[in-house]
Amino acid sequence: MRGLDGVYVAETRISYVDGEKGRLWYRGYAVDELARKATFEEVAYLLIHGKLPNREELEEFRSRLIAARRIPEHVIEVAEKLPQNLHVLDKMRVLVTLLYGWYGDGKPRMLTSKQVDAKPVIEAGTGLVGAAPRLLGIIAALEEGRELPSEKFELDSHAAYTLYALTGREPSLPERDAFNTLLILYADHELPASTFAAMVAASTLTDIYSAIDAALATLKGPLHGGALEEVAKMLLEIGDPENAEKYVENVLSSGKRLMGFGHRVYKTYDPRSLILKKVASIIANAVGGEARRLYETAVAVENAALKRLARKNIYPNVDFWASVLLYALGIKPRYYTGVFAVARIVGWVAHVAEYVARNRLIRPRALYTGPLNLPYLPLEARQ
Ligand code: CMC
């Protein structure tokens, strides 16, 4: 019961994880095929609307994402005043909250006591998918003291725009394609803690801005999206493949957790991580230098860890190789979980829209194990 391990709390047609075989499907399509052939925009449409878009639908969807990069001036003004020590995801939460109403109110509408119209959720949710890269880019630019990313409406690929917003430069085609693959692989994953948090919030029929706020708060933790940043920190600390064996031994013998390893559902290699390992190898080889060294260090950590953990069915999860790829793409580790959020907003919107359409308030019970009917002692009489 603890951690809701193995408990089914909803039905879904959005994604399916086979944790034994290490496979993942979005709306029935194998994710490895989507990662090779599709754009992030097609996958986002598929997840939210339930079908791959035709040309016209895709163009309309893409235009809406691009238009959503325009955000009100007061959001930028508040971003400029945010304390620098806030985590990137906390800053994103503030900015998402400030966007309330900008793409419609995002509230599910109750038609009857059992029927709910989820269109406003999809409407505002799509706006937030489009806005997320700009919000993250503004946060990064302010922290790094560079010019704020513009809407750059002519940059029509979501992957290319996100990389531009984060780094201030337009990516090469291989960089764009690698990042597109990463965004696709992060777009949804059934019911991790952040998606469930969004659903719990949404089941009260609150708006999608608030549900995404709940999801961002949950994603930040190191057992979930925060692991992405921790992996990079760990690999940089190890510094060289030669140090990997000893480092892994020390972590595991002291009973700590190796970041980027293990998963509640996968009992084998995470299929997303396998794909990202290949992509990371290509980009790290092309970039060379530090990126190549980090990749080789990661290979050494993986080998050392698998010797000890594979017998417990603990393998690299998506965050392990994604972290290596993001480093090779020149993104600073403090923005990695923000990148995760840019992709996963799609899954949050899709699951919230699916759930509220047949809404029932999520309100579980906790088994009470404490005493009852204790006598109330006045303050002076207490020990
Ligand atoms: N390193 C060492 N041991 C581990 C690890 C790890 N990364 N993960 C699990 N274990 C061990 C754990 O110590 C326990 O051992 P024992 O049975 O001897 O007590 C056993 O495996 C089961 O652990 P659990 O905590 O019951 O497993 P869980 O299903 O609750 O854990 C997890 C899932 C992701 C929280 C965990 O694997 C973990 O903490 N991993 C490190 C953080 C991480 O990489 N998170 C990213 C998750 S995937 C993508 C994402 O959401 O961002």
Image (tube, rainbow, N blue to C red):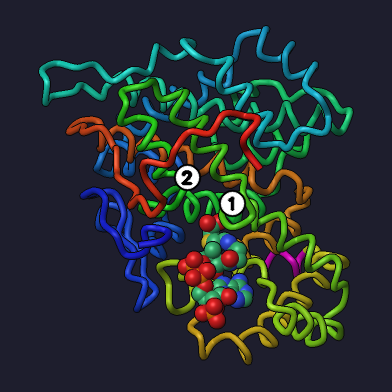
Residue 172: x percent and y percent? Answer: 70, 48
Magenta stretch: dominant secondary structure: helix
Residue 284 is one of the magenta-drawn residues = yes
Q: How far apart are labels 2 and 1 at the CA level?
A: 9 Å
The local crowd at label 1, few if under 14, some if 14 to 19, many if 20 or more residues have their Cα within 10 Å, is many
Q: Is residue 15 visible?
A: yes
Amino acid type for the residue under numbered disc 2: Ser
Which residue is located at x 29 percent, y 32 percent?
353
Query: In which quadrant will I find the N terminus?
Result: bottom left
Residue under numbered circle 2: 194
**Res 225 label:** 1
> Can you give x and y, in whole percent of width and height, for residue 51 in the image?
24, 43
**Horizontal side of residue 273 vs 140, given as left or right:** left
Q: In what element is the residue under mark 1?
A: loop
Residue shown at the point (89%, 28%) measured from the top left: 145
Q: Foreground residue, 296 or 369?
A: 369
Q: Nearer the viewer, residue 143 or 234?
A: 234
